[in-house]
Amino acid sequence: MIAWLITVKEVKQHFRDYRTLFFLLAFPIVLMLILGITLTNAFTSEVKLDGISVLVNDASSGELSRSFAAFEGELSHSGIAFEKLKPGMEGREEIGSDHYTAYVQLSDTGMSLYSSSSTTVESIIVQGMLSAFTDKYNAAAAVAQEADSAEVQAVFAGSGGNYVKDESVIPDRMPGSMDYYAMSMTVMVGLFGAMSAGGLISSERVRGTGVRLFAAPIRRSDIFIGKVMGNVVANTLCILIIVVFSKWVFKAYWGAHLAAVIAVLICEVIMATSFGIAANSWIKNGGGRGLIMLVVQLSSFIGGAYFPVADSGIMGTVAWLSPLRWANHALLSIIYNDDAAAAWPAMGFFLGAALLLLLSTVDFRRNREVV
Amino acid sequence: MNVLEIRGLTKKFGDVVAVDNISLKVGQGEIFGFLGANGAGKSTTINMICSLLQPTDGDIRIMDHDIKLQSRFAKQSLGIVPQDLAIYEDMSAYENVSFFAGLYGIRGALLKQRTQEALEFVGLGDKAKSFPKNFSGGMKRRLNIACAIAHKPKLIIMDEPTVGIDPQSRNYILSSVRELNESGCTIIYTSHYMEEVEEICSRIAIVDHGKIIAEGTKEQLTATITDTKDIVIELKNAAGAEGDLLKGLPGVRKVSQEENVIRIHSDASVDNLNRILKQLMAEDLEIRKVEEREPNLETVFLTLTGRNLRD
């Protein structure tokens, strides 16, 4: 209860400090906006396709003509337009002058495809679909030699009318610039928890209030827990504000497992807080603050807060030294690979590191002299 | 019953003995003055009483609770008004008092009542929602006191509670100290202002070089001074009276000066007043007033330690 009293006081003071609010809220949001807008192109992975139109000259009869008509019907739902060759039109010339994506010539002896060289991607798509149609038609023709018409129809029915199969060389969804910076800035703010934690105990000494705290009939552990909890809660609230703000104002994507995302971020704040406390107990008289600043800035830079870091190469390896990289990696998996379990290794890493860091400050907490 | 009992208290910092085998008893209802120059061991003693420093040796009992073995009970009875302000500038006066009272286990409606009472006691009832950063020095000092009394301690340690404030606030604080004492609080009071200690303290201890060198009521202490006297001379303009003008005269032990007033601490057995006045007149200094004062605490302190309290 006493620890909670100190926690509440810490949170109040945190949110009344305009410098802290600027650093933890305004700064990352503004940076998110600037980097998100200016580096949009660096994150674009989309290929814009123009409409696909196919010119058809159907000189065939019988089964091929009927099957192709059914094929046209299915693909028209996918936004591909088929047009009959009109009298007086020359199919190849129409392709040459880029009026159509492809020209298909059907005859009883087979099917020919002419594609436009200026719409390569679209042409490949048409080619792929026609290839799928041809395979199915040939299979049906082979069946027809030894079976009745109903079995032939079953071959086509078995296709389900699906001539388009999505296969991608990139994951289902990749972060846009705003998505990326919303995430990386939030992770960076989590790391900033080290800075406010650096002065948790010393600030009470500087303000003179440590005398009252340590002379009160409470355990030193209550003071310690209350102060740590206060820093964690205050920084977590800042993170939640940034997540909500980026989600609703900047439309950043945070995926379907927000609870896992928040859990990783909270563990990161606990680790950062522990580091801040440890650094200040390792190096006295303000030196700890310098160490914290150095580590936080370096970690932010190499961990990909400002620019995405490649997975391979020296930088890719060095980046793993940064806790920011661990958090970013976990969050990318949770958000974009739909892998909530990716939270566990990151949480384990952060909590383990926090434990080690706090253990390194045991001497400080055992020292019973305050002044 | 003794509210505070100290036996053989010693504190060493390496080879330096800051507090040297101090023993002391403070009874219920006393205002106990604790006098000592800077570095005398006064703050170290107070810090040990407040459990902020661990004694090298000796025992401290507050309300009969040993501060090592029954620390929580001992601390529960203690209120501290530190010399340096111990308040949060970014929390309102109410929040400050309420937070510190909460550390003593006071909750709910009682906490609200005690907080309001403490603020009203120090004259800040109407400033409950204001932030100390907007307060004058005197108001901050009063809030500093409010934070120490909301949990109604039996023993309050006031370390220089009036330092650096205006006379009006000082008077307010001194009357508050008396009022607290009348309500049953025992108070340990330290100050550099000897007149404050003389005015409010029922018993006084003088600390020097880590030891208590004198202890008793004001009357008991001044009665011990029979071999020295204080001569106070007011000049029209003291320019030219500086330096060693009077120091070599027979019987003169120490000369101090504040603006146009010269204070001469001298052997009582030596009749040197005429020689002092002649010396001043020889320097063309116009004398306005001459007074030979009865020994007071300042005289006692000076006689025992060889220096002024504010040196």
Image: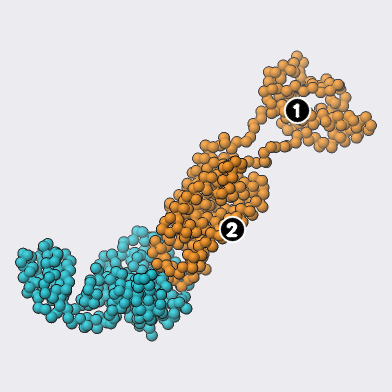
Chain colours: A orange, B cyan
Q: Which mark identifies residue A352?
A: 2
State the separation of the CA atoms marked 1 and 2.
55 Å
- Image mark count: 2
Q: Is residue A290 above or below residue A100?
A: below
Percent from the top left, x then y, of residue A101? Answer: 71, 24
Identity of the residue drawn at 87% across and 32% down: A139
Q: Are marks 1 and 2 on the same chain?
A: yes
The quadrant where residue B68 appears: bottom left
Disc 2 on helix, strand or loop? helix
Residue nearest the observer in this picture, A334 or A254: A334
Q: Residue furthest bottom?
A: B1
- Which of the pair A331/B52 is nearer the observer? B52
Which tag, 1 or 2, sits closer to the chain's start? 1
The reply, left or right, for residue B302 in relation to residue A65 is: left
Q: What amino acid is labelled 1 in the image? A: Gln
Q: For residue B127, what is the image quadrant?
A: bottom left
Q: Residue at x 84, y 23 (%)?
A: A110
Residue in the foreground of this view, choosing between A311 and B174? A311
Please say whether residue A70 is visible from this viewpoint. Answer: no
Q: Counting other residues with Cα less than 10 Å from the Cα at mark 1, is it few (<14), some (14-19), or many (20 or more)?
A: some
Mark nearest the camera among 1 and 2 is: 2
Compared to B23, does B107 lie above or below? above
Residue B203 falls left or right of residue A222: left
Which amino acid, mark 2? Gly
Give the left or right position of residue A218, taking residue B231 as reference: right
Q: Name the outermost residue toward the top.
A: A88
**Local crowd at mark 2 within 10 Å, few (<14), some, or many (≥20)?**
few
**Relative to A298, does residue B12 appear above or below in the rendering?**
below
x then y, percent, for residue A126: 74, 28
Horizontal and vertical percent position of residue A55 = 75, 22
Q: Secondary structure at mark 1?
A: helix
The residue at which mark 1 appears reads as A127
